[in-house]
Image (tube, helix red, strand yellow):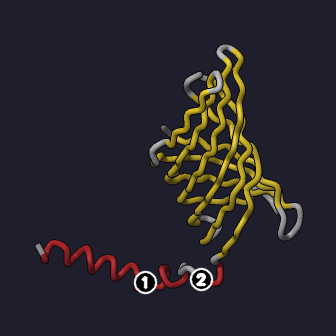
Amino acid sequence: MKLRSAPASFLALCILASPAARAASINPKDITYTVSPIIGYEMQKKENPTRTKLEFTYGVRVVAGYKILSVEGEYTQGKSSEDFFAPVEHIEEKTEKIRVGLRSTYSLGSMLDWTLRGGAEAQKIHSSTTISGTTTESDSPSRVYPYVGTELAIALGSTVSLNGGILATLK
């Protein structure tokens, strides 16, 4: 068994020690770190009753790594309130999400960047439902789902950009 892995180990060592590998080495000075606020609306598909709604969302995103491949972490909170008239029902929800994943950003010019991203999202939802004066509160179990997304960023200067994106959580 050790004899079979020896050629593979030798090949890996030769590749790492080659002049081409050293010339293409990763420079730690190229690593960037960003902390960005998140403020916006999130469209959500809801059940019971079935509907689509917008939820005001805010939070923070931290990105670290190289432009071509970075690690991202994100925490967001969202609050929403809805009223239904048949039957009379009021639903309030508070959503908390944590996302951890990878992203890759490509420059499409001096002012425009395109990003692809994906990872895992953990979410928890606290609901308060009032029907005919009776209020019921519930917490969803914490669940983890994969997510994928894309976004465009327009630079408005050296430190400010306007971002818009689409993200799908696969449930």
Q: Is residue 80 above or below residue 103?
A: above
- Percent coordinates x, y for residue 88 in the rendering: 68, 19
Tag 1: amino acid: Ser
Tag 2: amino acid: Asn
Viewer-proximal residue among 12 and 130 = 130
Tell whether 160 sits left or right of 70: right
Mark 2 Cα shell of 10 Å, populated few (<14), some (14-19), many (≥20): few
Rendered-image quadrant of the N terminus = bottom left
Mark 1 Cα shell of 10 Å, populated few (<14), some (14-19), many (≥20): few
Going from N to C along the chain, the mark reached first, 2 or 1, is 1
Q: Looking at the image, which residue is at 59% across and 63% down?
A: 72
Location of mark 2 (residue): 27
Q: Is residue 89 above or below residue 79?
A: above
Q: Looking at the image, which residue is at 71% across and 30% down?
A: 82
Tell whether 24 sits left or right of 164: left
Viewer-proximal residue among 56 and 15 = 56
How many angstroms separate mark 2 from mark 1 (CA)?
17 Å
